[in-house]
Amino acid sequence: MRWTWARFEGLSLDDLYDALALRCRVFIMEQGAFQDPDGLDRHAWHLLGRDEAGALKVYLRVVDPGHKYPEPSIGRVITAPEVRGGGAGRLLMTEGLARCEQAWPGRAIRISAQARLERFYASLGFRTVGEPYSEDDI
């Protein structure tokens, strides 16, 4: 996987287009309509993972502390459908957590995730705090 780790203003036009297209493909086409551009992209780091051919296969963003939560927060975690089940999501999260540790050494990281992925995120060291809730009708 070839990684790009950039602030919003540091993304190339191709990176931005590919990230928004993948987010649309997964978050809107698969999961139903919601407002994906939420105003937080400009206050975040973006991690893009491309395959050998240059196609974007995984993506996440890390919102700066104080914009969504007091801690840095990982969100918009995406694995393209064609690479699911092969470890790409774990590779993405491992890379994202390493980048967070470099940017905010020793800080806790928050993630708001779908309940069906609770075991996956627990295997990466996250713990559930609170009861399930609805966000964007999911």
Image (spheres, helix red, strand yellow):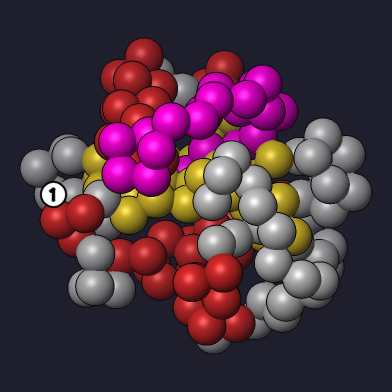
Report the residue at 50% width, 30% height from top. Answer: 34
Region in magenta:
28-49
Report the residue at 13% width, 49% height from top. Answer: 52
127 magenta-colored: no
Identify which amino acid the numbered label 1 is placed on. Answer: Glu
Image quadrant where residue 55 sits? top left
Vertically, is 97 above or below 37?
Answer: below
Q: How many marks?
A: 1
Q: Quadrant of the N terminus?
A: bottom left
Q: Which residue is mark 1?
A: 52
- Expressed as whole percent of the image width and height from the top left, the position of residue 62 reads 63, 45
Image quadrant where residue 4 sits? top left
- Expressed as whole percent of the image width and height from the top left, the position of residue 14 reads 30, 20
Drawn side of residue 35 relative to residue 44, left or right: left
Vertically, is 110 above or below 37?
Answer: below
Secondary structure under the numbered disc 1 in the rendered image:
loop
Pick the residue in front: 72 or 6: 72
Pick the residue in front: 92 or 130: 130
Report the residue at 60% width, 82% height from top. Answer: 122
- Expressed as whole percent of the image width and height from the top left, the position of residue 53 reads 10, 42
- Expressed as whole percent of the image width and height from the top left, the position of residue 110 reads 74, 60
Report the residue at 76% width, 50% height from top. Answer: 72
